[in-house]
Image (tube, grey):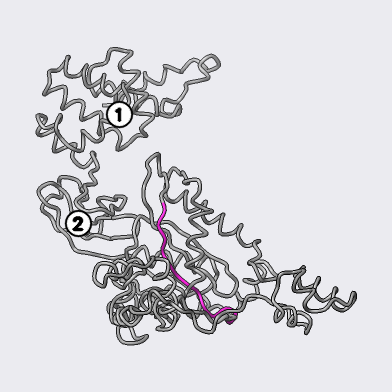
Amino acid sequence: MDQYELIRTAYRKYGKNISELSRMTGHSRNTIKKAIRGEAWNYKERRKQPFPVLDPYLKTIDRWLEADKEQTKKQRHTARRIYNRLVSECGFTGGESTVRRYVRFSKIKLGLDSPGAFVPCDPAIGQEGEVDWGTAHAIINGEKVLLKFFCMRSKYSGKHFVRMYPCERQQAFFDAHIHAFSFFGGVFPVLIYDNLTTAVRKVLQGKQRQEQESYSKFRAYYSFESRFCTPGQGHEKGGVEGMVGFVRRNYMVPVPEAASLEELNDKLLDNCRLYGSHIISGREQSVDVLFEQEKQHLLSLPLTPFSNIHVHAGKADKYSTVIVDKNRYSVPSRYASYPVKVQLMVDRVDIYFSGKKIASHARLFNNNKWSLHPDHYLELIQQRPGAFDSARPILQWSKQWPECLHKLLERFRTSLGVTGGTKDFLNVLMLYRDYDADEVESAVSLALEQGISNSGGVRHILIYTNAPACIIPQVTGWESSKTPDLSKYDQLGGIH
């Protein structure tokens, strides 16, 4: 541009002619004439890019790329693969950059691997919600575990709900919806999903889906409409796709720690509420302000939440366990070989016999796991004391015992013998049924101090430690009482 200004100024202001300007600048006369006429010279794109070295191979490249239209995206030619094939199969001697440049132009021409474009939309107020799952690590009770987190997001306001689960099974899927609807205070008329197996049984042509029967019942109970994305087109619910990443980067960094899953979910709920003050880029009002506007458009909640409990018939086996969802849960040994009924909830398993609850366990989510309550086996082990040291329930429980229980067991066995001491020690363990753990362990410690070597002494300490002071009424008033009239007894002599 400096040369252009020099030429025009010298010609118009100082009267230099074309020949003089050409000698001064080194430009051709034609270039000088263009500048004088007012045309600023610059680079212009060629209408057609020549590929002189590659020209004999252009039709071959186009044929390979055309055939790629019939192949899956993961098995199509890359520019590197085309270059390698040209070298090995066609004797090409040119550079790879030339091939890359032409392949880029050719793919655009053929419409291959185009990133596509999107239509900007303004979602209707209070009409659509988006649902998705994400994965993240957390530390629960000191152990690092991989968890799934459910996310539901309002398409209009951007308000979202997040809850963690050990798995993505259907009961967790329903439970997450129930908590989300309670959080939003209503139900979105339309919910948009991927083709989740917990909701979709079979993907049909176009937008048609064959839903899982239990999901259809759940959807009908809350009266919302489901909409499923085209397979592989997650951008159709791009808001919640982005929210899953936002949650992982902001709520899960650093890796969250909690004593229980419920405590972790309470922390996530606080984060969801705090997000309400956030103003999304391109909007003028906060998330909470927008949500207050759309809240009145949501469907009202039913009077009672959907019953998310599965009831199964089962039978206690010879190990006094009931197999539920490929895992084993113990019941008291006296119910072995009897039929039972199982109530399966998202986080618990309750087992009933003749309408009476006989066991309750935290639900297991892996396969071939055992949940054994030691209390269920104490009477059985007392009948077979030789199994005490190898009994799985006792081995698992003994890892949590305080040192005083180990010492008490050793004293009992020294005093009463291995068999007798083991049987009597089991009587001490049964005290946990009626007393708090702290009370039992305090009584055991006192028994050790006093040299007690049997379960009766430990029970005696517990009974009298917990006995209220009013059990033995205090006798008062002797010092002021009158001397009794003993003459009344003389009258008894006349009674025959």
State whether residue 452 appears in this view: yes
State the image coordinates of residue 357 (x, y, percent, origin top left).
Answer: 27, 54
**Is 130 covered by the magenta stretch?**
yes
Residue closest to the eye, 180 or 117: 117
- The quarter of the picture where residue 274 lies is bottom right
Residue closest to the eye, 357 or 120: 120
In this image, 180 relative to 493: left or right?
A: right
In this image, 453 relative to 206: left or right?
A: left
Residue at the spot of label 2:
326
> Of all residues shown, which one is farthest toward the right?
13
State the image coordinates of residue 289 (x, y, percent, origin top left).
Answer: 67, 69
Residue 93, relative to residue 409: is it above or below? below
Magenta region's main secondary structure? Answer: strand
How many residues crowd mark 2 within 10 Å: few (<14), some (14–19), many (20+)? few
In this image, 169 relative to 380: left or right?
A: right
- Give the residue type at disc 1: Trp
**Is 405 covered by the magenta stretch?**
no
Q: In which quarter of the image is the C terminus?
A: top left
Q: What stretch is highlighted in magenta?
A: 124-136
Q: In which quarter of the image is the N terminus?
A: bottom right
Which residue corresponds to the image point at 53% horizontal and 73% vertical from the top-left?
186
- Give the residue type at disc 2: Lys
Does dot 2 land on a helix, a strand or a loop? loop
Residue 199, relative to residue 311: is it above or below? below
- The quarter of the picture where residue 438 lies is top left
The disc at residue 401 is: 1
Residue closest to the eye, 107 or 198: 107
Residue closest to the eye, 53 or 292: 53
Which residue corresponds to the image point at 42% horizontal and 47% vertical from the top-left?
138
N-terminal of the pair, mark 2 or mark 1, is: 2
State the image coordinates of residue 226 (x, y, percent, origin top left).
Answer: 42, 80
Q: Are marks 2 and 1 in contact (CB under 8 Å)?
A: no
